[in-house]
Image (spheres, rainbow, N blue to C red):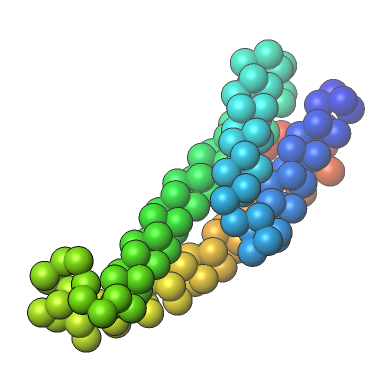
Amino acid sequence: MLNNRLFIGSTQAAIILGATAAQYLQLFLLPVLLIPLLVSIVGAWKGSVYVKPYYQHIRTTSLVSLIIFTVATSLLFAGVVVDHQLQLAVPEFLVILENPEVFMAFAANSLNLFGVIYLCLAGYIAWRSYSCLVPLTKRNNLNE
C-alpha cells in the first residue's frame, strides 16, 4: 500500500506541477496531462480494490483537465488567426472585411478568455488534488 500511496502522490504532483507551469509549458502541457491519464488507467487496471478509487480520481482529473486545455487552446488559436487576418491590408475572408469591429472584439476577448480558462483549470486541479491527497495522507478510503 505504501508504494501505491507514493505513486499516487507523485502522479498527482505531476498534474499540479504541470498546471502551475502551464504558462511556460504551453503545448507541452499535453503530455503532462496524458501521462497521468495513462498511468491512472493502468494503475486502476492492475491495482488493488483499495487504490482503484484514487486512480479513478486521477483519471477523471486528467481527462477533464485535458478537455478544458483542448477547448482553451482551440479558442486561443481562433483568436490568433482572426487577429492575424485583421492585421493584413486586405483580409482573406469577406466576412472579416465587412465587420472588422466584431472580429476585433472577438480576437481580444478570446485571448483574454484563454487566461481566465487557465485560471479556472488551475483552481479545478487544486480542488481535485486537495480532495485526493488529504484522504491519501490520512490513509482513508477515497469517497467519490
Q: Residue furthest top?
A: 46
Q: Residue furthest bottom?
A: 101
For residue 91, above or below residue 63? below
* Residue 117 percent coordinates (x, y): 48, 65
Say whether residue 116 is visible: yes
Task: Pick whichever, 35 or 47, lies toward us.
Answer: 35
Q: Residue at x 66, y 35 (%)?
A: 36
Q: Is residue 123 left or right of residue 78?
A: right
Res. 108 image quadrant: bottom left
Q: Is residue 63 left or right of residue 130?
A: left
Q: Residue at x 26, y 79 (%)?
A: 89
**Considering the image in quadrants, where does the N terminus appear?**
top right
* Residue 40 percent coordinates (x, y): 64, 28
Q: Residue at x 60, y 63 (%)?
A: 123
Task: Pick whichever, 53 or 68, lies toward us.
Answer: 68
Task: Pick whichever, 59 or 116, lies toward us.
Answer: 116
Q: Residue at x 55, y 59 (%)?
A: 121
For residue 105, above or below residue 58? below
* Residue 91 percent coordinates (x, y): 21, 72
For residue 31, above or below residue 81? above
Say whether residue 127 is visible: no
* Residue 43 percent coordinates (x, y): 68, 22
Q: Is residue 74 left or right of residue 15?
A: left
